[in-house]
């Protein structure tokens, strides 16, 4: 008999067979329970994979889902509610007068000016009679499919924290964004494409850069994958550079096999570190994307009518239109969450209209209006709107009084978001701001919006949690109420 200096316990044949059989039985039982959605809450807490769905795709994590996938259109910079969707006759009536609501008035970056009416005309649209300004002629044709939240509010009027709050529920960095939470909770539907895709403005990343689509303390595998649809190289490092002729298909496979072996060996010494898991998963996904991604990004198969619908034939709408059309193609292939950004970081060229609302807003509004309306109409025509949720939002609104002569300053007191598609009651509006469009009468925060979105995806927002630093963290923190008034 050989010595056993390490005092290692060697199992008998009987013990080995018993453990093996019991383990396989457990796997089989878990599979059967999973098919009946009886492992939902456990799956939500343990699903760290990019490619393994935690639920039955036709069901939901905690209750039957209305939405299978989500596309979020984010207006970076603070879209002016009182020049777009929040019609206020008092602003027209009292334009030029001193703004005196009876309480202290502060401005984020300047001195409060006089009341300033919108330079755009207003008109009611659709059977619902929804007021929309002339800045959005195309979205105006979709109002009967949209549900407006007229009382959105933020806890900050600073861009970075505001963008964080709308995406993560917190004004500070380090927290997972909604797309990461959805990826963590529901997993992927298409194993050949990322679960969470980000399509930034072609001119640059938004405020907070990549922090706005971070996985925070969730496993890194759930962060957003950036695709620059208008770039000659839409996905960075997906293919070898043209100069690297020595890289062949065979050498690449051999290199990946060696890398995988080294990674696994390294991983054995760092159990529990999700970064290496995410890196390995990203390599595996990248290999699959080399085949699937080029097809998604190739718009040559789209009809000319579809390209015109999204505005690809017009310079002002081409970039955002390409992103929206790419988003539709990703959704068709069951990418779970797609985020499309309008506007990059900076003081101009986005929705941050401090100097002149009449000159600055048309550029960014015109670039977004036609493609966003096209996305609603296209998904509806294809029957995809029934299980796809569309969200249009921004980080905060703008003031009803002037900044300088004709600009508007940041306003966390009220702004507008709208939703369309799966489980949404079209043609309705929830909440309202005061007579000035200065403050929401009863604020609706991101927590309520996030709770409603998760609800439509079959998730109870109070149960989707992740243990971090001794606390069960969640997207809605300790807040959040579903908004039943906008649900079908």
Image (cartoon, grey):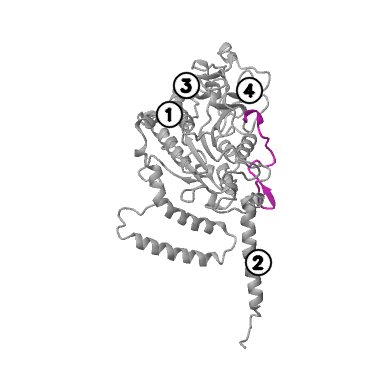
Q: Tell me if residue 483 is in the magenta stretch.
A: yes
Q: Earlier in the sequence, mark 2 or mark 3?
A: 2
Q: CA distance from mark 4 to mark 2?
A: 61 Å
The numbered mark at residue 433 is 4
Determine crowd level at label 4: few under 14, some 14-19, many 20+ residues with C-alpha closer than 10 A.
many
Towards the viewer: 261 or 290: 290
User: What's the distance in space between the residues labelled 4 and 3, CA to CA?
Assistant: 20 Å
Q: What is the spatial separation of the Cα atoms under label 4 and label 1, in whole angstroms?
A: 27 Å
Examine the rendering and report whether any part of residue 235 can be seen: no
For label 2, the residue is: 22
Which residue in the protein does label 1 denote? Answer: 367
Mark 2 surroundings: few (<14), some (14-19) or many (≥20) residues within 10 A: few
Check whether the beta carbons of the residues at disc 2 and disc 3 lie within 8 A of each other. no
Residue 471 belongs to magenta span = yes
- First in sequence: mark 4 or mark 1? 1
- How far across and down, in percent of the image, does residue 122 sit? 52, 16
Q: Secondary structure at mark 4?
A: loop
Query: Earlier along the polypeptide chain: callout 2 or callout 1?
Result: 2
The local secondary structure at tag 2 comes to helix
Quarter placement of the N terminus: bottom right
Q: Mark 1 falls on what kind of element?
A: helix
Quadrant for the C terminus, please: top right
| Dominant SS type (magenta) | loop
**Would residue 443 appear left or right of 380 to someone viewing this image?**
right
Between 453 and 408, the one nearer to me in the picture: 453
Can you identify the residue that label 3 sits on? 135
Q: Residue furthest bottom?
A: 1
Q: Nearer the viewer, mark 2 or mark 1?
A: 2
* Gap in angstroms between the C-alphas marked 3 and 1: 11 Å
Residue 342, position in %: x, y? 47, 33
């Amino acid at each position: 008999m050989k010595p056993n200096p390490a005092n290692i316990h060697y199992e008998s044949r009987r013990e080995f067979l018993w453990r093996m059989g019991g383990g396989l039985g457990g796997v089989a039982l878990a599979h059967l329970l999973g098919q009946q959605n009886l492992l939902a809450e456990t799956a939500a807490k343990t699903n760290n994979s990019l490619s393994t769905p935690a639920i039955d795709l036709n069901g939901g994590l905690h209750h039957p889902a209305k939405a299978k996938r989500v596309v979020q259109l984010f207006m970076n910079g603070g879209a002016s509610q009182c020049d777009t969707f929040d019609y206020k006759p008092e602003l027209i009536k009292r334009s030029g007068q001193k703004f005196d609501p009876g309480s202290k008035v502060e401005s984020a970056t300047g001195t409060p000016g006089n009341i300033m009416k919108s330079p755009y005309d207003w008109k009611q649209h659709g059977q619902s009679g929804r007021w929309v300004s002339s800045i959005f002629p195309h979205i105006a044709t979709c109002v009967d499919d949209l549900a407006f939240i007229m009382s959105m509010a933020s806890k900050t009027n600073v861009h970075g924290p505001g963008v964080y709050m709308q995406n993560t529920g917190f004004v500070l960095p380090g927290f997972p964004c909604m797309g990461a939470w959805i990826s963590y909770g529901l997993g992927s539907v298409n194993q050949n494409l990322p679960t969470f895709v980000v399509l930034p403005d072609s001119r640059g990343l938004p405020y907070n850069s990549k922090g706005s689509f971070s996985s925070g303390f969730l496993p890194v595998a759930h962060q957003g994958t950036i695709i620059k649809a208008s770039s000659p190289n839409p996905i960075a490092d997906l293919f070898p550079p043209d100069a690297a002729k020595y890289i062949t298909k065979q050498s690449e496979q051999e290199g990946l096999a060696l890398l995988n072996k080294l990674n696994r060996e390294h991983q054995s010494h760092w159990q529990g570190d999700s970064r290496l898991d995410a890196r390995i998963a990203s390599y595996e996904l990248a290999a699959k994307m080399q085949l699937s991604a080029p097809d998604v990004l190739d718009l040559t198969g789209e009809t000319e009518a579809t390209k015109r619908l999204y505005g690809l034939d017009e310079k002002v709408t081409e970039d955002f239109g390409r992103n929206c059309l790419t988003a539709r193609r990703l959704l068709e292939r069951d990418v779970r969450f797609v985020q499309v950004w309008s506007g990059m970081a900076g003081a101009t060229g986005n929705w941050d209209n401090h100097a002149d609302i009449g000159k600055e807003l048309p550029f960014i509004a015109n670039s977004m209006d036609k493609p966003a309306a096209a996305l609603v109409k296209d998904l509806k025509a294809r029957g995809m709107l029934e299980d796809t949720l569309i969200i249009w939002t921004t980080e905060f609104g703008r003031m009803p009084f002037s900044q300088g002569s004709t600009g508007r300053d940041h306003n966390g007191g009220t702004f507008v978001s709208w939703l369309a598609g799966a489980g949404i009651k079209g043609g309705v509006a929830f909440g309202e701001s005061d007579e000035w469009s200065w403050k929401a009468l009863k604020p609706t925060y991101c927590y309520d919006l996030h709770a409603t979105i998760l609800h439509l995806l079959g998730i109870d927002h109070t149960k989707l949690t992740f243990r971090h630093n001794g606390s069960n963290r969640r997207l809605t923190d300790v807040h959040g109420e579903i908004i039943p008034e906008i649900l079908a």
